[in-house]
Image (cartoon, helix red, strand yellow):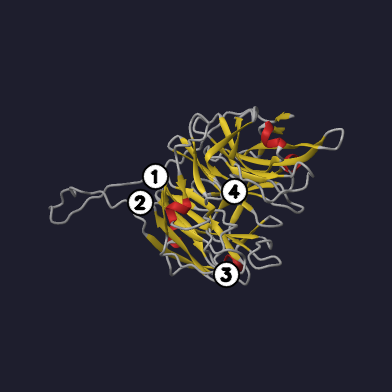
Amino acid sequence: MKYNFLNRNGWVPFLLIFGLMGSCSSDDNGGAPDPDPDPDPVEESRWITVAAARMGDNPGDGNGGTLIYALNSEEAKDPTVSIAPFDNGFIVPSNRTARLQSSEDGSTIFNISYAGDTGGNYTKYTVEGGQSFTQAGTQISIAPYVGSAPRWIKLFDGDQTGAAVYVSTEHQFDESDAYVRTEATMGVLTLDLVNSQIVNFTEQSITLSAEEEANGYYISRIDMPTLNAAGDKLYIGARLSKVDPATAESDSDFEVLGSKTIVLDYPSLENPSVITSAVGHGDTNGYRSINAFLYNGSVYQANQGDPEGSHILKINADNTYDDSYRFNLDEALGVEDAYILAWRPAANGKGVLAYRHGGSAEGVAGAQGFFALIDLEAKTAQQITEIPYDPDFYLFQYQGFVVDGTEIYVTQAPVGQNGNIYVIDTETGATTKGAELVNVEGSHFIGAF
């Protein structure tokens, strides 16, 4: 079924900044104008919002709620600055870890509450610094369409649209109770972030090949919608599960198939199809952070759970996987069982990637995490050694990177310990230690926005 709520033309607000430049000098030139009057360019600041996840029952679970605190980029780069979001941050409405997004300039935070009484409520806030976040516009619930714990993401269309998805599954049997296949029903909703209105909602079946379905494979989780360069297709990452066709019982020891992505017409959200990679295997739905990005006309997508270690895969402008592009993290980093937890490229095709691997120490909340500097063109990755690592540095729930030109801001703090903001210049690889992050017992930081 399909619901059309709003038919609108997209618009993109533009910020016009006027500066007064020029000066006169009456020094050794005898009062003549300075031949080079322009001052050094002043670097524009932007808000950097740090997100902190409080412990619920266990260290690092993040289930005690989310707090945010904003500082400007100069403060974020200053190691003498110290912030304590757990003590004086703004509490983001969410029963568990909030699913946060930010505008491209950092001036607005978007949130859809996750689970609980407020689950599925969309709210946006104007960033005013420190713990000051003012609600902008109206609140709207998308829970009637995609549930109270929706998986959602902000599309890269000038901060205009968000997309939320879910999938439900049901095993099907014939008259003799023999397993036939698993029906996977996908719901996709688009949300007008500017006017807080639902734009469109569709619900339809996702099918795999007849052979795959007969063998018990089905799509069990979807996430991370991404627009293609033309703006006429929406890609949705997918995770495959499997049952034993003889018993219809869950099968956890199965052959991992080629990574798959669902392709939909946009903005109609119709005509779903599934494309398959011949390079990567495993899931493409990611977890808490955006898993696919548009760069140079193509979409680059991370996969997880790949038996050969995580890859970054490439989807060409013709909406098919580019199987000539091979970027394997095991090979690039010289590790085994690399697992991409979160990543973000800058406009130059270089970026920062959060990962763990088979040699990661087991910390209080899970496997130890690391950051790497990557290059999509050169297909290289190198651990950022200037950032300190601890067995309790946990990145599985990491959500946000701030991209400001060629610089990328990240947060580093082991569970329950203080840490810092770090700023990576993706062009030079230089890493700068910034503001101190004050932590509390059992809690951790989940990124910058």
The residue pinned by badge 4 equals 286
Residues under labels 2 and 4: Cα distance? 26 Å
Residue at left offset 69%, top offset 40%: 217
Above or below: residue 149 compared with residue 366: above
Dot 3: within a 10 Å radius of its alpha carbon, few (fewer than 14), some, or many (20 or more) residues? Answer: many
Query: Which numbered disc, 2 or 4, marks the residue closer to the eye?
Result: 4
How far from the left and from the top, in percent, is residue 42?
34, 52
Q: Are marks 3 and 2 in contact (CB under 8 Å)?
A: no
Q: Secondary structure at mark 4?
A: loop
How far from the left and from the top, in percent, is residue 308?
52, 50
Above or below: residue 404 compared with residue 268: below
The earlier-in-sequence mark between 1 and 3 is: 1
Is 23 left, or right, of 90 in this rendering?
A: left
The earlier-in-sequence mark between 2 and 1 is: 1
Quadrant including the N terminus: top right
Question: Toward the viewer: 92 or 169?
Answer: 169
Q: Secondary structure at mark 3?
A: loop
Q: Secondary structure at mark 2?
A: loop
Q: Which quarter of the picture shows residue 377? A: top left
Residues under labels 4 and 1: Cα distance? 23 Å
Mark on residue 439? 3
Q: Identify residue type, mark 2.
A: Glu
Q: Identify residue type, mark 3.
A: Asn
The residue pinned by badge 2 equals 427
Query: Which numbered disc, 4 or 3, marks the residue closer to the eye?
Result: 4
Q: Identify residue type, mark 1.
A: Asn
